[in-house]
Amino acid sequence: MGLRRRETVFAKRTLSEVPNIVDWIRQGLDDRAVAVRKVAMNGLIQNRAIFSDIRSLTDRMACDKSAAVRELAAFLSSRIDGTKVASDDADGG
């Protein structure tokens, strides 16, 4: 009497546009949420080879109000310059 069984249905669809990671990272760097800027900085570190203006982005984020974002910017700056910072010792790099 009116009983039904619920079934989970999974579907997938292809993306209509290919996501542009460079634009997403740039938007993340400009976001007001610290968590988003930290994720964007990690994305910038991992994909630094595809950015032509990596130095200007790193310098801009070095002045961020969040200490965590500034630390990531210092780490990336050290990688660009080829110097080591204290946090490099922790990752064995």
Image (cartoon, rainbow, N blue to C red):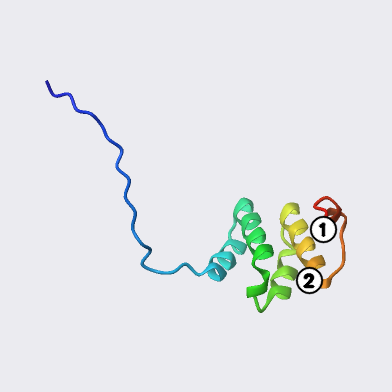
What residue sits 76% from the left and 64% below the top? 76
Q: Answer with the quarter of the image where residue 22 lies.
A: bottom right
Circle 1: is it few (<14), some (14-19), or many (20+) Cα within 10 Å? few
Give the vertical position of 1 relative to 18 (above or below): above
Q: Residue furthest bottom?
A: 52
What residue sits 62% from the left and 60% below the top? 40
Q: Amino acid at mark 1?
A: Gly
Circle 2: is it few (<14), some (14-19), or many (20+) Cα within 10 Å? some
Give the vertical position of 52 relative to 6 (above or below): below
Disc 1 on helix, strand or loop?
A: loop
Along the polypeptide, which appears first: circle 2 or circle 1? 2
Q: Nearer the viewer, residue 31 or 15?
A: 15
Q: State which quarter of the image contains the C terminus.
A: bottom right
Find residue 25 and report its horizontal and vertical position in percent.
58, 65
Find residue 88 and report its horizontal and vertical position in percent.
83, 56
Residue 80, numbered circle: 2
Disc 2 on helix, strand or loop?
A: helix
Give the vertical position of 28 relative to 89 (above or below): below
Q: Residue furthest left?
A: 1
Find residue 18 and report its horizontal and vertical position in percent.
44, 69
Label 1 belongs to which residue?
A: 93
* Distance CA(mark 2)–CA(mark 1): 14 Å
Residue 35, numbered circle: none
Q: Answer with the quarter of the image where residue 73 lies.
A: bottom right
Find residue 75 and report its horizontal and vertical position in percent.
78, 61
